[in-house]
Image (cartoon, grey):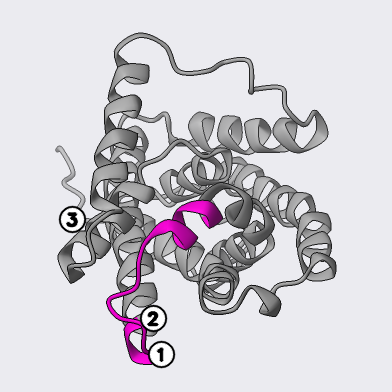
Amino acid sequence: MSTWLMAALAMGAAGSAHCVGMCGPIALAVPSLSNTAKGRWAGTLLLNGGRLATYLLLGLAVGTLGMGMRLAGLQQVVTIGGGLLILLSVLVPGIFRRWSPKGRMAIGISRLRSRMARTLKRTAPEAVFFSGVLNGLLPCGLLYAALLGAAAMASPIHGALFMLAFGLGTWPALVALRMSTGLLGPSSRAMLRRLSPVLLSAVAVLMILRGLELGIPYLSPGPMTVTGPVTECH
């Protein structure tokens, strides 16, 4: 499990350039609790804490889904398929962009953005935290890739831990952006953009290896066996 947590952490860190582009404007728009350094830090931690709470709940949900798939005998197919999808998104950038949300999902996302816009105008701690919670629900390709990795854990707890590590990996860049834009310059962002496809590919390969069940400790465990008393019929 530690291998996967490190992969999730690295995945979040390497995807920070993407996070700065997607979540950066929101992070900068949310007001601080006060004009003091303490108020800015408190607001930053509340905002990112709310986003992390959403990731944890999503990890629990997809981990539970993955466990159900495992019990149904479909986990191997789902894990390999998820890894291939992530790898395809790296090899052919933008291939999934044309599949934009439609219908009720688009309406729901629009209402979510409107709700966030209203909460951004408030400086109460609960409003800042809720802004972070909503931020974690906004559509994001990197988030979808992380959720595929969490589902591959086939466990609610492990899925939540995977998303926790992923979310913490994004913290340094977003905290630095909010506290001081000079801490994350163009060169740092360019380096993160170069690292992102490499780390995403690594996670994709790990998922494929896990699905293949090759019997490699930590990387590709063998098929799960059911243990328990054996009853013989005479």
- Residue 36 magenta-highlighted: yes
199 sits to left or right of 233? right
Q: Which residue is mark 1?
A: 37
Where residue 219 appears, as percent x and y from the top left, is 62, 60
The local secondary structure at tag 1 comes to: helix
The answer to whether the residue labelled 1 contacts the one labelled 2, judged by CB atoms less than 8 Å apart, is yes
| Magenta extent | 24-39
As displayed, is residue 77 above or below residue 156? above
Tell me the element at label 2: helix
Q: Which mark is residue 229?
A: 3
User: Where is 10 relative to 34, above or below?
Assistant: above
User: What amino acid is at disc 1?
Assistant: Ala
- Residue drawn 69% across and 62% down? 14
- Residue at screen point 46% across, 35% down: 139
- Is 180 placed above or below 134 here? below
Between residue 231 and residue 26, name the one nearer to us.
26
